[in-house]
Amino acid sequence: MRRFGRTVVTAALAVAVVAGTAGWASGDGLRAVTGPPPGAAAWRADSVSGRALPDPAGATPAEVARFFAGLDDSARQALVRSHPLVLGNLDGAPLALRYEANRIAVAATGEARYASLAAPGRQLLAFDPRGRGQVAEVFGDLERAPHVSVIVPGSDNDATSHDAARRAYTGPAGMARALRAATGGGATGVGGSGDVAVIAWTGYTTPVGVGRDVAGGRLAGAGAARLARFTAGLDAVGVPDPVLFCHSYGSVVCGLAARNTDVTDIVAFGSPGMRADTAAALGTRARVWAARGPSDWIADVPNVRFAGFGHGADPTSPAFGARRVPAADVQGHTGYFAPGTQSLAAFAAIAKGEVR
């Protein structure tokens, strides 16, 4: 009974520390955006040469890829024009079609908050305006790069903050640009040289502020299902198995998705836990890495799980069994991609497949 009491107190402390460290709180119970975007019903009602279109909710990415392989260019373009929002988010559809469809879908919203996403050179692999908005953006040549990385961000990220100017090296797009530059590629989105393409995947409903959402796994579970389908879509169109770089709450998403994703490496940094006691318990053949800087406040969050709250073992602990990434010069919770840091250099080596 005494041990049970300590567990309850520690679990409560986990939530309190998260709130106290960040210094503010927000409302809980965000509704996770899941399933296909608006327009799915019209898509299902349509056809091409008498052939039904693949159900965006039920068809696998591999089935989607086979469907598009049987269409000519005119049929593909007709679908882009008629159903840009659905096609732009359809995992398994050709990459170039998704880029084009998402440019149309962003412009069609008419919303100023999304205007920058429609700028020339942006390569959006997903765009969903529901809720706070979700987006996946490609930096580099995803069709030709021999190595691919996916950035999975944590709390307070959405389609509007994804590439905020004040978040260079800390927001999803900033992290992606920094990683691509560190691997020898250009920091711009389209084309360019370099062997690594990087995707900033703000593709799930992230927690806002602190509280039950960030201490629980509900949003992470919904995000994990979307991440698993997204990576299956990459595989369906011939993209190399990626590396997942998972920051903060994003590492909870990656932990839950691990057994259902075909990736080479999973890198957790600034992690509150991955909802697993050990790296082996993640159920993945991928190599698992972990990093935490000396001034990252995440170290003050107790690594517990109780009554649905807390995210479990510290991925940087020896007992967890992950490979350690050097991070002695990282500043704070979001400094892992700052130019010149040990962590960014190590991330670049992992992304390029140079570490065995």
Image (cartoon, grey):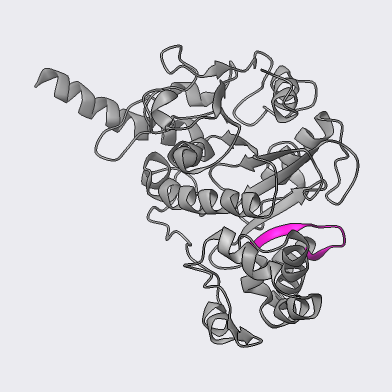
Instruction: Tell me residue 294's x, y (percent).
Output: 58, 15
Residue placed at 44% from the left, 43% from the top?
210
Residue placed at 43% from the left, 53% from the top?
222
Instruction: Tell me residue 127's x, y (percent).
Output: 65, 63
The answer to whether residue 128 of the structure is visible from this angle is no
Residue placed at 66% from the left, 60% from the top?
126
The answer to whether residue 327 of the structure is visible from this angle is yes
Q: Is residue 142 left or right of residue 61?
A: right
Question: In the rendered view of the protein, which quadrant contains the N terminus?
Answer: top left
Q: In this view, does 202 lie above or below 186?
A: below
Q: Is residue 206 left or right of residue 65?
A: left
Q: What stretch is highlighted in magenta?
A: 118-128
Instruction: Tell me residue 335's x, y (percent).
Output: 67, 28
Please tell me whether residue 23 belongs to the stretch shown in magenta.
Answer: no
Instruction: Tell me residue 197's x, y (percent).
Output: 77, 42
Please tell me whether residue 123 belongs to the stretch shown in magenta.
Answer: yes
- 216 or 256, which is in the foreground? 256
- 5 or 318, which is in the foreground? 318
